[in-house]
Image (tube, coloured by chain):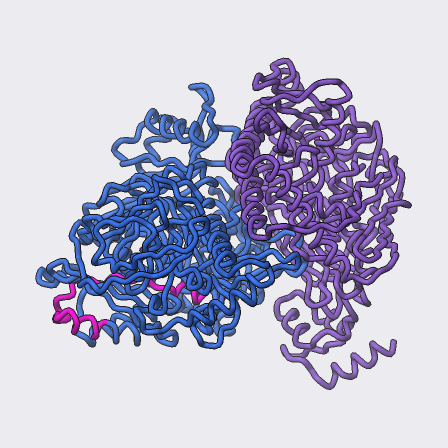
Amino acid sequence: MNEPTTATARLAIDIGGTFTDFMLEDADGALHSYKTLTTHDDYTIAIGAGIDRLIENAGLAPAEIGQVLHATTLGSNTLLERSGARTGLITTSGFRDVLEIRDLRMPRLYDQDWEKPRTLVRRRWRRVVSGRILADGSEMAPLDEDAVRVETEMLRSEGITSIAICLINAYANPAHERRAAEIVRETWPDVHLSLSHELLPEEGEYPRTSTCVINAYVQPVIAHYVARLSEMMRERDISAPLFFMQSNGGLIPAEIAAEQPIHIIESGPAAGVIGASILGGSQGTDTMITLDIGGTTAKAALVENGLPGKATEFQVGGHVLQTERLLTGGGFSLRVPAIDLAEVGAGGGSIVSRDAAGIPQVGPRSAGSDPGPACYGRGGSELTVTDCNLTLGYLNETSIAGGEMTLDREAALAACETQLSGPLGTSPETAAHGVFELSCVTMIQAIRAVTTERGRDPREFSIFAFGGNGPLFAAGIAATLGCRKVIVPPSPGVFSAMGLLCAEIEIHKTRSFRRLLDESALDDLRGIISEMSALAEAEAQRPGGRVSVTARMRYVGQSSDLIVALGAPETLTVDTMRRAFVDEHDGVFKFVAPEDEPIRITALEVAYAIPVGRLDPSRRRMSTPGPASRQRAWFGDAGWCDSPVIERSALTEAEGPCLVVDPDATTLVPPGATARMTATGAIEIDLTDGYGV
Amino acid sequence: MSNSERNEAGPAIADPIAFQLFRHAIIGIANEMALTIFRTAYSGVLKSIMDYSTAICDREGRLAAQGLSLPGHLCSIPIALKATLARMEAAGDRIAEGDVLVMNDPYSGGMHLPDIFTFKPIFVEGEIVAYAAAVCHHTDVGGRVAGSNASDSTEIFQEGIRIPPLKLFRAGQIDTTLMEMLKSNVRIPERLEGDLRGQLAACRLAEIGIQALATRQGTKRFVELIDDMLAYSEILTRAAIAELPDGDVTFTDYIDDDGIDVGTPIPLVCSIRKSGEQLCVDWTGTAPQVKGAINNTFSYTAAASYTAVKTVLADGAPNNDGVFRAIEVIAPSGTIANAVMPAACAARGLTGFRMADCAFGAMARLAPGRVMACGDGGNTNVSIGGWTRDRKPFIFVDFVSAAWGARPWKDGLEGNTTIFANMASYSIETVESENPLVVTANEFVDDTAGAGKFRGGTAMRRDWMLLEDEATLSVRADRQSHRPFGLAGGHDGAPGRNIMVGADGTTRTLVSKFTMAMCKGDVFTHHLPSGGGYGDPLERDPNAVLEDWLDDYVSTETARDVYGIVIADGRIDTEATQARRAELSAA
């Protein structure tokens, strides 16, 4: 596919739970943003309206749009709301209940009320056929082809529209799975079909079945959506190629996303992290913790040397947050590469409650945006974090939604007095400040999940904060952790849309590969890598990209793998691979075995990346400055401080305490800290002089 | 023996916000210890089954904060630490900065020999402010059977190396004599050393964190805040206990046998006395200790008791000494609930699981309608080991538990681990790629769930076929003759079953615990029990029966004869159903 040379504008669209955000980069590199309410019944309505508005504002012709980049919650919502296709599963006899058995573990202790998330395929539509491949790829029993026909007919008669096929050990030899697919296709050519060995040729029947079933369940929905979106764009004379953001932070052509939607399930949060890595890097900060705080959750990720931390598997479709990594089982296993994000249920709308012992806590219940915090005046009466921030003077009447909504300070104060400071016998500001501190330590749990739990010391990182509430808490969180620098990007409230403009195409392929690391393995390894690279390149639809290799490796006798980055395939030798493994082992275990200790490889992954035109972050894009004012804000030991309120566009350098405001976010600069504007338009807060909450 | 310490004054927390900030900090440290072990452990037992625990104890050895881990270990750490400190004091061996204490002896406060405890005193300005503690189940600690968990040992001396409370490090220097002794007595010394390294790293991490916290707060305030931690749990626990009815109840259940005296049931007797804000779990009447290796030490009995009580209370109280103050546990010594020398105890897991079920049964008598019926009594332990044709050893050890009893408000779970352990299962494909085995089935057994208004979880089966010429199969299972109990008119769950289908086509039904030879092509099938039901099956929502029938959880016959639901042409025959239900309830 060739992009017309005149069409150089790039349009990013990020659908969130409440808002759909737009960011347009025109041919001159100027940015235009727009925000509108998400239309949940049909996302394309809000998208169409937003495009019309943005094109008009920017004075562009539709044909000038050369690229549309998209992040959507459609995949994760389809799973959460169970609104996917009626799905059937064909699997090996003896393994009907893999989806239900999972790894048997649950995410909660001492809870006799625990309920597993309902499986995406009901037991009646999980059909088994005999035939057995062994772990070495040999055939123990032939596939019962008649049974495949019978079960296909049964599923068709039940109104199934999408079929997943996952047979035991298909990763080692896909012959039975392929043959079963042929048989299904013969009798039922138009059914959606997802095959486990194509989606995830890796050992592990539960993650592979689950991943394959998620694909089957979501695929008809995403395929339909891609068609709708393309049609809507065509109606507007936009012929630009459409790309989706994947959970791994890379872009993927829409046609591939429609076939393999498993890659775009968590696409929104990934875009922000990519944006952070590019923007941070452009001002010399390539190692940071990204912190995205909204109304109900705080999400953290790690960026090291410009690269976001990656996870190989995560859980989707559950209602249990992912902060406590040891207690898995809250959702369905989805084994695709993803940015390693941790999430905790604390944000601006989080409700402040007291337990049976009178101890206050923040979240995980949230007032959301409707009714919202008490100060929204929409019927919410429970005290929230935002009410406390208003009481503390960190927000003012016009801080939310560019002043389109007026916050009720009296209502916030009253909620704080009756629900918290009164019962605790303290002043409202002391209690509200306590809530601010508790919010910080609660949100820090997400940061710990991606730092200390990974053997990293958070004090060595800067904090890159965005989302509606990120800039308000960032300095407090940084001080609590002992971090010294905070970065707040421009347009923090629509930053994920900006992140889309920073992303590259990135396609991942994985494969099981169980071999001792030696010369004989290397030839086979090179062959498999070039095979995987070719597949990835074809999906990217663009040649000439960079290939990098990752392997799972362990010492023989060890019972778990390390994930080892190996770099470009040309550089691979037994020596370089051994050295990369040993370095990683030393980092994790502080221990290295003798030189001749045999090493085993268990799986290979190839990532193929190619840019599609990146945002130039060094261009500073400003709007016009507004009037300056002052407001009273409470800072714990420092008490009430008369604090300047500075429009971001008016900021050059300022001593805390002060507040730097954007239309959709407030950046809190505490006493002792200094804020300054950088060349990229970001705010940088220096905490070196030590501010403690 | 009792572990209760009554607090007459009634606890209170002076500064709730400061306390909450401190609580986050100290629980964060205990959790990070747990994650350190998870990240750095060498063995699969630690990584997949998470058979380990971490904790911060106060300077008197009381549990202050526990890392996320398994309920079966609750309170094992303070009991082991207090016993260790008492031993050190008796020996006149002062504890110095840089020391690390180690022990695994069940008869000096430990659990069973594979569980090795490490304790590190944390000093601030020359004074002990706390202890960091970690306990891990090690893959092998020697003894007569690889894996050190045989159920057919009859005295502790067969089970591996016993480590009394000793110093592994003195003032930062490792005791190489002790370390070499340990390594010489286990089958895989690198793994023992690798896992111990993880334990030490966790304790070191806690030391740094606690020192920073205590220095920031000041030692005096730090100690007060720790006391607040205990007070907090005590307040929450007592408040939840107060809501239960007062009473004095007893529940009796039986273990099939100990595998040595086959066919001799072993009674477990759990009495619960509850008055006001205090609750006592008393195991008086439980069987004397047995010959087989299923004897509990006190801490495991206590953990089983706390599991049932805490689950029913559902108060969210953090696990620490404050919980123990409100819940007293009594277990007479010399019983299977509190064994003395020289009882074997390696496979005491089975008894712990069954005692947790028994304590749930007693709680159900105390607070009917608030407690689930009995689950599969898990877990079953299957070990298959031998030599490959090229004379390499293989050891395959599997633990499986999967069915819950019905809840008084909804069905029991199937395919979910027991509350007492929360253990993960291996991937079958990984089992097959690493062992000379084919797992020919791993699924639910249709039509097995204990019937009720709410049904129990369906039973699960797992089948293993041997690909090598010969191996030794060792199984520890239960509930073949004493089935998982139903409640309030719900039916009991189906019994467990062990079946050997030989390569020659013969089929043999086997007892619950045994060791035997297995040959190439033999298939060993284990059916776990299913969960018990809750309430009268005739009160079950007919549509729920139909849904179960559509999913093959219930057969046409069971629907008709147990639930009184007549299904024809895939639909409920309303008239026939009314008649059938009337007929059954009259019977």
Chain B representation colour: purple
In the depicted structure, whether residue B99 falls above or below residue B233: above
Question: Magenta segment: does it hold A70?
Answer: yes
* Residue A180 seen in the figure: no
The outermost residue toward the bottom is B575
Q: Position of residue A611 (x, y in %)?
A: 21, 50
Residue depicted at 24% across the width and 41% down the height: A284
In the depicted structure, whether residue A334 falls above or below residue B186: below
Q: Quadrant of the N terminus of chain A?
A: bottom left
Q: Closer to the camera, B325 or A396?
A: A396
Residue depicted at 57% across the width and 50% down the height: B20
Q: In the image, is B574 to the left or to the right of A475?
A: right
Q: Position of residue A365 (x, y in %)?
A: 53, 63
Q: In the image, is A455 to the left or to the right of B344?
A: left
Residue A521 location, quadrant: top left
In the depicted structure, whether residue A333 falls above or below residue A67: above
Question: Magenta segment: does it hold B36?
Answer: no
Q: Position of residue A318 (x, y in %)?
A: 51, 60
Q: In the image, is A3 to the left or to the right of B508?
A: left
The outermost residue toward the top is B177
Q: Closer to the camera, A19 or B509?
A: A19
Q: Closer to the camera, A212 or A287?
A: A287
The outermost residue toward the right is B285
Residue depicted at 63% across the width and 54% down the height: B416
Which residues, given as a range, are shown in magenta?
A51-79
Q: Position of residue B340 (x, y in %)?
A: 84, 31
* Residue A159 seen in the figure: yes
Q: Closer to the camera, B399 or A64?
A: A64
Chain A representation colour: blue
